[in-house]
Image (tube, helix red, strand yellow):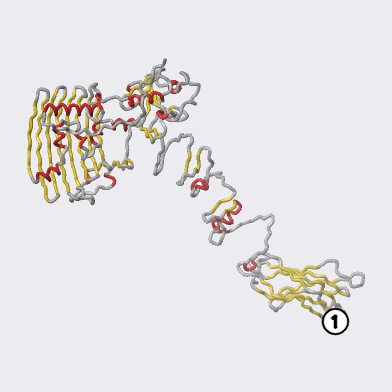
Amino acid sequence: MSEPNRTKPAKVDTGVAKLPALPSIQTGNAKLDTWLGQLKERVEVREGERGNPWEAAVTRRDLKAVEDAFSKMNGQGQVSTNGTDIVFEMPGGGTASWAIDKFIDSIKNLQVYKDLMKRLDDPSRFDNLPGEIRDIVSKSIADEAAKLGTQIGRVEKISESKYRALAYQVDTLTASVQGAQAGIREVDFVVAKANFAQAGKITQLEASLGNYYQDGTPGRAILEEQMTATADRVAGLSSQWTLKVQAGKAFAGVGLAATEDGAGNAVSAFIIAANKFAIVDPNTYTTGLTNTPDNAHIPFGVDSYGIYMNTNVYIRGNMRVDTGGKTLVDGLRGSAQLASSSAWSATTASNLIYSWLGKGSTAPNNNHLVIGDTVTMGTGSSAVTRTWNGTAWVNPGVIINGNLLVSGSVSAGAINTNGLIIRDNAGNPILGAGNQLNVNYIDGLGALATQSDARIGSTVKFPDGTTLNTQDFINRLSKIDSGNIGTFMATAAIGTAYIGNAAVNTLQIAGNAVTVPVGRSGGDVSIAGADWTINPSATALLFDEYIDFGTGVNAGQGMLIGICSFFMRSLDDAMGQIAYYINGGSPQSVLQFGLRIYNGGDTDMSMPVTYPFIVPSSLSGNVRVSVRVTCIQNGAGDYHPFTCRMPRLILLGGKR
């Protein structure tokens, strides 16, 4: 038959029992009053409300909580505490410790914290004092002023018996006028009994105005200072000082305490209760009655939203930042903190974690490690601490177990992280493990766009929502115009350009500044034969029109006019001449030619004949060009008519 669970209640759990406040009772019978006071004190101590913590009762609920804590631990071993950490001693050697808000709990368990956080309208703040003193200081000094009026008073009293001695004195100042009261009370006391001695000093200041609030209740401003020094053979030694201020619902206080329990464990604490706490450099004062320090002279501050540091922070040693999350006490695998007395070894550290997980004494690899696992090996000054960063055991430096927000830059020789994700302000992933670079959430590519071999998609989206294809970059992004052509072409000049195939619909060139062949065609022109006795020559006009020779430095330079034609005649040995005229003047150049007939009949010449002329380089603008052909008589009685077939005027060379 198995042993029953001793911590399991037999009845239904109705919740934690709460002790109501126990008043101090004065019957007028000294022995009875002493008995009631001792009974009240014992009940309150056993309930853990005040007094010697070693006398507090342990309930089945407390035992059940301990049992539950053990049941959540895997493996075998022993659990102990060093006051701040929970330590698990492993069967294979070494210890494991982890944080479960241990520091906060250690503060909450301090008596100075419990006393400091009690408001000035809570009568239980005096429960650690003798009953006679509690009865005095529990009364509002402002209410006493309303009863006594304006007075100065002192009370001195000594109470001594075989088992207990008490002496105290009370000094009071009170003033009261038409619902306004003010009072000061100062109480000094000493008490001694078997195995217990205590000295105390309490100063109380209070100002009160009746009907201060709309509901008719008074408004009170209170300051209270309490100092006690206690020597208890069982509970140990304790010195405590608290200073509290309260104005209506606003409350602040400061507490200083030093304790040593019966086992010799010493603890000291300095606690501040306030919405805002800051350190201000007093040397900022210069002249005048007031001084407002600038930001540089408030290096440190704390409020309910966070901790503010307004200057350099110097840390010598390791720092750990834990922003919460799952811990080992939750039953999940979190980072572990282990210790061993052996010399440092990466293999030993890995095996220590492996053994702590209950998997054996020798780890086959490092797959069981998680980032943040920390192992300390050695003793005293030779101890070495290393943390697992995902690939190796390294000096922990600063450990951040959670989120980190940095408003500014982060400089690091190397960043080693697993599962890194970079997000935009809206929380959308920009780049991260398992995620490609998402440019939809990037406000400008910045320096990325200037990197060598940077690869982009087939389109680029502009701020106005329009898209640009990669083939449109020059056309859309940076067109060449008269203002920036010098950026794309050195001084906007091209020495030699080679174009394989150029298709141009319309080419406009100012001033015909490019050599372009120009041609004119005419109809057949017949020239009458010349008679030696009547008319020695006959002339016909082939062309008479205006031609643009262009403008500028090279206008009309090296111009060549060519007349191409087929000629026909009836008799041989005829002579002809062709000439051109500028603006109707004298002929600029005259060329003669001979015509010959074959087989005695009219026959076209076998090939066209070209007659070139060189145009003067001084020509520019629109010039009238006339071309005439003349038949010249060779001898008396000869008659030599001929025909100029399909004449064509061709202009080549120069700049037009």
Query: Is 493 placed left or right of 161 in the picture?
Result: right
x, y percent for residue 73: 41, 24
Q: Is residue 322 visible?
A: yes
Choose top left, top right, bottom left or bottom right for residue 299. top left
Picture layout, residue 240 above or below residue 183: above
Residue that appears at 46% across and 46% down: 426
Choose top left, top right, bottom left or bottom right for residue 412. top left
Choose top left, top right, bottom left or bottom right for residue 158. top left
Please state which of residues 506 and 54 is positioned toward the viewer in this rendering: 54
Residue labelled with disc 1? 531
Quadrant where the image shows the N terminus? top left
**Seen from this angle, which residue lies furthest bottom?**
534
The amino acid marked with disc number 1 is Asp
Picture layout, residue 463 above or below residue 238: below
x, y percent for residue 208: 17, 47
Query: Is 458 placed left or right of 380 in the picture?
Result: right
Picture layout, residue 221 above or below residue 26: below
x, y percent for residue 538: 81, 80
Please state which of residues 472 and 631 is positioned toward the viewer in this rendering: 472
Q: Is residue 347 visible?
A: no
